[in-house]
């Protein structure tokens, strides 16, 4: 055996010493750094940051809130091609190494030696997972060492499949997309399972530079990355040469696709968001909560359309106010310049912007630019409606040619109609519609204004408006409580009031300006006779009425204790008025409106469930479960599918009172100010129109046993809506358009007749019981304790309730 040269022995000893020193150093580093490392066991129970999502009662997405877009996927749900693409691009030896790839590390060491700085290379999928979950992205030696140590720990604790699942759900892929599920939706509008090979490779190439090399921000760099991924997949045998060639030449099909709600209900979504933030703070935006509302998709769409169409109809009735803006086309020449102008006027609701390029009176068309190179001819027929606006009360003469309506440079609004595009404008007027279940208070539909992006103010829940004559049913209900009946006779005649509370002399009138003499209460409500309502309130007392109104949930501080209350001078929101009418609709129970039914966490467990009030005659079997909107602990609520639980609603109105008021309000539709609603072809509808002084507000609130709905129209800054814009013209059609759809297929439902009610013949002029021989006799219903006497008996006149006293300090001068 040859003697080993001394120099070789010396070299081996040196290498062994260096190895031992390295091992000791590595062990020392491990002992120093290991206690400071986070425990990787938390990865088994990781909760990904996800946006807050709001849904309708039937599961339609209404909105997403939060910066993170993520749709977590299980490993088994990830397509094999997607796994292969990421492994080819990021870590080809992922399934064979132990968290650190020696070849990659060697490549990183070479880079360090050449450039004297930490560079790319060397990071395995496991190391990236460690960095994404536990470490920052700073380029330091200490962070790299921590990353390596964490990778070893992760490999010991988790399987390769678990690691890859974590990585694919956590990685940032640009455009606020975290994970492959969200990226597939945002770039292609489809789940990963439906992507082509080219699209899959495009996503797999994003981790290198997700913000600056994605197909939206930089298509060329994204194509280069896609080509790299496809080449690596070919080299590793994941795809064939033919597949490589086809995918390499595929065009870029990515476009930014934001989460589009299936149901447009932004005012409802905002109410739900506010509740979630109130419950969970800022964590609501990233903890993946799913908020389910009470809103019906079909009814919400009907409400959206009813508000939209009726506000546009009102706006069109009052003339064209001119272009939204006027531009000098000589200073803005060509499609690129026109596109810049259009971007200053984003779409509002269904109204898109258009720029008038030319006008041809002979051809009766205007040439408009719509954006992205598209031009159209707008015929004069679609702008013939545009009589010039002079004031809310006056419009000019109908236009006779195109040039009287538009001119080149006008920025106008357009909306789609059955036969093309029509000239339009953003309405100044606003409107709301609120619809809820009178049995539970669940909000079925809510629209808070013409367009949420144009104005986020939720008029349905926040706007304090005077309800006008829509408030009279509550005054009449108070009168029934004090002994009045539907047959009580009250004089509809001129009157002057000196009211201590009003500190002025007041000469109220009927809307028609006429007076009708002695009038039964039923007829007075149906025809909305102001003077009868005032005399009724004077008789029962304004202070008593304010106290009585608490039964309907109204805030007494906003109820004036004077005679103007009879004409609806109170301040209420549309939601409050709707809830007040629900007391009549359900037979006398005060229910609490609510819009969020339950909330699930990111694992689908219940964390919150509303406990709504329930209007029920026999609630003995229901346990008192505390206040509504009670947080749910441990997700231990209900069975799959969520069976709601309720608490009994308080009865605040006698059944006879609710029954008679409903009967009287049915006459508002049968023969009164809302008789247009007979076109709905239902006999179970009741309600009341409302119009305030100077036509500032128009209302209709109505119901049956299934739904109670209010519609309001008016300006945000109160001013006259113009002649004839009463509740029956401006608001009732909106209510009808909604209820026509909302009640389609719903059987007619009415209040059951309470015990103690009797129906007798009365004389309509005296309000007293009469015989069958009286040719004028009509039937009227009374509680048995308030049936008037016969004419021949000389009894009291129709149970007027006179002498009940008022104590309000008012006096009348006749």
Image (cartoon, helix red, strand yellow):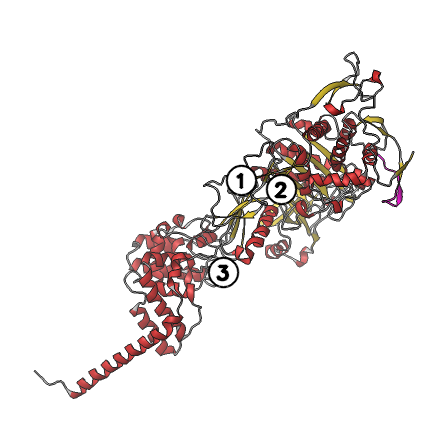
Image quadrant containing the N terminus: bottom left
- The residue labelled by disc 3 is 217
The quadrant in which residue 172 appears is: bottom left
In the image, 701 versus 581, the foreground residue is: 581
Magenta stretch: includes residue 503:
yes
Residue furthest bottom in the image:
6
In the image, 562 versus 702, the foreground residue is: 562
Q: Nearer the viewer, mark 1 or mark 3?
A: 1
Residue furthest top in the image:
773
- The residue labelled by disc 2 is 593
- The residue labelled by disc 1 is 645
Q: Nearer the viewer, mark 3 or mark 2?
A: 2
Q: Secondary structure at mark 1?
A: loop
Residue 312 vs residue 233: left or right? right
Q: Residues within 10 Å of mark 2 (few under 14, many from 20)?
A: many
Q: Earlier in the sequence, mark 2 or mark 1?
A: 2
Q: Alpha carbon of mark 1 to alpha carbon of mark 3: how far? A: 50 Å
* x and y percentages locating residue 599 in the rendered image: 52, 48
Q: Earlier in the sequence, mark 1 or mark 3?
A: 3
Q: Secondary structure at mark 2?
A: loop
* x and y percentages locating residue 767 in the rendered image: 80, 22
* x and y percentages locating residue 749 in the rendered image: 61, 27
- Does residue 430 appear in the picture of this structure? yes
Magenta stretch: give its range: 498-509
Q: Earlier in the sequence, mark 3 or mark 2?
A: 3
């Amino acid at each position: 055996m040859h003697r080993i040269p001394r120099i070789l022995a010396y070299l081996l000893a040196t290498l062994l010493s260096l190895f031992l020193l390295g091992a000791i150093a590595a062990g020392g580093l491990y002992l120093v750094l290991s206690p400071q490392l986070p425990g990787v066991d938390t990865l088994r129970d990781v909760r990904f940051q996800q946006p807050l999502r709001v849904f309708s009662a039937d599961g339609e997405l209404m909105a997403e809130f939060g910066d993170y877009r993520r749709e977590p996927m299980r490993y088994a749900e990830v397509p094999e091609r997607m796994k292969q693409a990421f492994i080819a691009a990021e870590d080809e030896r992922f399934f064979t190494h132990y968290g650190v790839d020696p070849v990659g590390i060697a490549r990183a060491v070479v880079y360090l030696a050449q450039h004297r700085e930490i560079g790319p290379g060397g990071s395995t999928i496991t190391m990236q997972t460690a960095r994404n979950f536990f470490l920052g992205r700073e380029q330091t030696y200490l962070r790299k060492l921590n990353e390596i140590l964490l990778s070893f720990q992760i490999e010991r604790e988790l399987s390769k499949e678990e690691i890859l699942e974590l990585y694919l759900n956590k990685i940032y892929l640009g455009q606020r997309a975290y994970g492959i599920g969200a990226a597939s939706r945002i770039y292609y509008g489809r789940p990963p399972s439906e992507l082509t090979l080219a699209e899959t490779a495009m996503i797999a190439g994003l981790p290198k530079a997700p913000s600056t090399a994605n197909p939206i921000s930089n298509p060329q760099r994204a194509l280069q990355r896609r080509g790299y991924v496809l080449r690596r997949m070919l080299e590793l045998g994941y795809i064939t040469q033919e597949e490589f060639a086809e995918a390499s030449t595929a065009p870029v099909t990515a476009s930014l696709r934001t989460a589009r709600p299936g149901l447009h209900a932004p005012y409802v979504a905002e109410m739900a968001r506010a509740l979630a933030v109130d419950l969970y703070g800022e964590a609501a935006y990233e903890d993946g909560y799913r908020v389910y509302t009470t809103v019906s998709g079909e009814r919400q769409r009907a409400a959206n359309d009813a508000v939209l169409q009726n506000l546009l109809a009102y706006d069109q009735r009052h003339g064209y106010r001119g272009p939204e803006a006027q531009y000098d086309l000589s200073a803005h020449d060509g499609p690129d310049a026109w596109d810049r102008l259009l971007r200053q006027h984003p779409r509002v609701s269904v109204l898109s912007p258009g720029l008038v390029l030319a006008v041809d009176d002979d051809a009766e068309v205007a040439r408009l630019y719509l954006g992205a190179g598209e031009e159209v001819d707008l015929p004069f027929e679609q702008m013939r409606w545009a009589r010039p606006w002079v004031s809310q009360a006056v419009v000019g003469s109908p236009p006779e040619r195109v040039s009287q309506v538009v001119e080149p440079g006008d920025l106008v609004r357009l909306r789609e109609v059955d036969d093309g595009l029509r000239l339009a404008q953003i309405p100044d007027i606003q409107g709301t519609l609120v619809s809820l279940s009178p049995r539970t208070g669940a909000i079925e539909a809510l629209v808070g204004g013409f367009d949420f992006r144009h104005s986020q103010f939720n008029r349905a829940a926040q706007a304090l408006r005077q309800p006008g004559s829509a408030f009279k049913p509550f005054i009449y209900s108070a009168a029934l409580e004090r002994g009045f009946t539907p047959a009580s006779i009250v004089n509809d005649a001129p009157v002057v009031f000196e009211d201590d509370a009003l500190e002025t002399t007041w000469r109220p009138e009927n809307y028609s300006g006429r007076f009708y003499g002695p009038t039964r209460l039923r007829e007075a409500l149906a025809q909305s006779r102001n003077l009868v309502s005032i005399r009724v309130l004077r008789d029962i007392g304004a202070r008593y009425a304010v106290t009585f109104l608490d039964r309907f949930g109204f805030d007494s501080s906003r109820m004036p204790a004077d005679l103007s209350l009879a004409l609806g001078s109170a301040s209420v929101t549309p939601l409050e008025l709707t809830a007040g009418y629900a007391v009549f609709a359900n037979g006398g129970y005060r229910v609490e409106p609510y819009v969020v039914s339950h909330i699930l966490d990111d694992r689908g467990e219940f964390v919150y469930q509303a406990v709504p009030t329930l209007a029920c005659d026999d609630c003995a079997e229901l346990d008192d479960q505390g206040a509504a909107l009670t947080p749910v602990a441990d997700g231990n609520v209900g069975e799959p599918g969520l069976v709601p639980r309720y608490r009994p609603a308080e009865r605040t109105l006698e059944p006879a009172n609710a029954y008679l008021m409903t009967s009287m309000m049915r006459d508002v539709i049968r023969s009164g100010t809302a008789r247009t609603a007979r076109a709905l072809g239902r006999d179970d509808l009741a309600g009341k129109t409302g119009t305030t002084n100077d036509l500032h507000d128009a209302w209709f609130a109505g119901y049956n046993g299934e739904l109670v709905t209010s519609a309001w129209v008016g300006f945000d800054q109160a001013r006259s809506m113009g002649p004839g814009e009463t509740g029956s013209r401006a608001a009732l059609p909106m209510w009808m358009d909604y209820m026509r759809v909302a009640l389609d297929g719903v059987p007619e439902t009415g209040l059951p007749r309470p015990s103690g009610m009797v129906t007798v013949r009365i004389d309509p002029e005296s309000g007293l019981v009469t015989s069958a021989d009286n040719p004028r006799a009509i039937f009227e219903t009374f509680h048995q304790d308030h049936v008037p006497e016969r004419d021949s008996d000389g009894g009291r006149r129709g149970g007027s309730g006179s002498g009940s006293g008022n104590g309000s300090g008012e006096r009348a001068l006749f």
